[in-house]
Amino acid sequence: MKVLYFAWLRERIGISGEEVETEAGTVADLVAELAAREERYAAAFADLRAVRVAVDQELATFDAPLKGVREVAFFPPMTGG
């Protein structure tokens, strides 16, 4: 699946996106896999209260299932203005 990173997550991880092979069942499982990779991922996902997620371009929660999903995007909370 394609995993995308936006704003400060992209800056901390150092890439805007990647193709990921995973057996993760939920977004939370995917985050745990990514955070375990190396320090830059661990730093990006250290405080999940500051991270939002979209699954196939729909806002989702961290318990969202990943079966059949093509894209997961991580980004900071959005503010209006």
Image: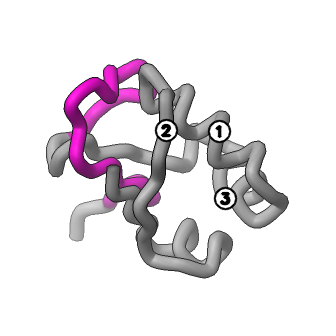
The residue to which callout 1 is attached is 33
Image point (22%, 46%), residue name: 70
> In the drawing, what numbered circle is on residue 44?
3
Q: Residues within 10 Å of mark 2 (few under 14, many from 20)?
A: few
Q: How far across and how far down the image is residue 31, in percent? A: 58, 39
Is residue 55 rendered to the left or right of residue 62? left
Disc 3 element: helix
Image point (55%, 27%), residue name: 29
Foreground tag (3 vs 1): 1
Image point (41%, 46%), residue name: 52
Foreground tag (2 vs 1): 2
Foreground tag (2 vs 3): 2
Is residue 12 rendered to the left or right of residue 61? right
> In the drawing, what numbered circle is on residue 43?
none
Disc 1 element: helix
- Marks 2 and 1 close (CB-CB < 8 Å): yes
Mark 3 and mark 1: Cα distance apart in space: 13 Å
Residue type indicated by callout 3:
Ala
- The part of the image, by quadrant, that contains residue 59 is top left
Is residue 75 rendered to the left or right of residue 40? left
Residue type indicated by callout 2:
Thr
Is residue 69 rendered to the left or right of residue 21? left
- Marks 3 and 1 close (CB-CB < 8 Å): no
Mark 2 and mark 3: Cα distance apart in space: 19 Å
Give the residues in magenta: 59-78
Disc 2 element: loop
Q: Does residue 24 sit above or below 74 in this rendering?
A: above
Q: How far across and how far down the image is residue 34, in percent? A: 63, 47
Q: Earlier in the sequence, mark 2 or mark 3?
A: 2
Q: Viewer-proximal residue, 60 or 41? A: 41
Residue type indicated by callout 1:
Glu
